[in-house]
Amino acid sequence: MKFFSRFIVFICCVLMFVSFLTSCEKKKKEGKLIITEQAFSLRQDTENTFTIDASGKIKNVGEVDVKRVIVTGYCRSCNDRWGVGNWQTSSDIDRMPQQMDTISYIAAGAEEQFKFTEVADYLLAASQENPEMPEKLEVVIESFETVE
């Protein structure tokens, strides 16, 4: 009987040890990106229309390289309705290629530049001067992939 109980305890210990080994997964390393610089500039498209362009730098502060980084910009204080004398943006539709930048590869610790246009648009009223920049402009990292 003593042998049987020791055998059961031994088997339980072995099973616990095996379960600990199989449950411990290697943590997958992931990339981490931050926007280190961002600048917005006002550009006159036509005689009566203005647009905001964005540029800056993005840094990979993660442990692994990343690829296909998509960066775009938003004007959170702009209207979704098109009209004269207001900053407007189309947040409900997919971004056009000129409204985002795709960075093909960023090594771990490296920094790359981005640039895109048409964050927001403005149509002047008949007697209006140049518009002021809107508030709440931001650059957003939409997506990226980790290099295996």
Image (cartoon, rainbow, N blue to C red):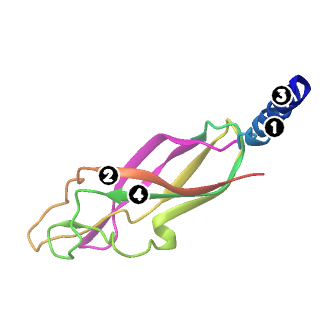
Specify the amino acid type for callout 3.
Ser
Query: Separation of disc 2 and disc 1 at Cα?
Result: 57 Å
Whether residue 51 appears in magenta in the rendering, the answer is yes
- Which residue is tagged 3? 5
Query: Separation of disc 4 and disc 3 at Cα?
Result: 68 Å
- Which residue is tagged 1? 15
N-term mark: 3 or 1: 3
Q: Nearer the viewer, mark 3 or mark 1?
A: 3
Choose top left, top right, bottom left or bottom right for residue 102: bottom right
Specify the amino acid type for callout 2.
Leu
Query: 6 or 29: which is nearer to us?
Result: 6
> Which mark is on residue 137?
2
> Which mark is on residue 73?
4
From which residue to which does the magenta span run? 29-58
Location of residue 71 in the rendering, given as x and y in whole percent from the top left corner: 51, 56
Q: Residues within 10 Å of mark 4 (few under 14, many from 20)?
A: many
* Vertical side of 30 occupied by 117: above or below: below
Q: Residue at 37% x, 62% y: name it.
A: 119
Query: 136 or 117: which is nearer to us?
Result: 136
Q: Residues within 10 Å of mark 1 (few under 14, many from 20)?
A: few
Query: Separation of disc 3 and disc 1 at Cα?
Result: 15 Å
Name the side, left or right, on which 85 lies relative to 15: left
Is label 4 in contact with label 2 (beta carbons under 8 Å)? yes
Disc 4, SS: strand
Q: Residues within 10 Å of mark 3 (few under 14, many from 20)?
A: few
Location of residue 97 in the rendering, given as x and y in whole percent from the top left corner: 52, 71
Q: Nearer the viewer, mark 3 or mark 2?
A: 3
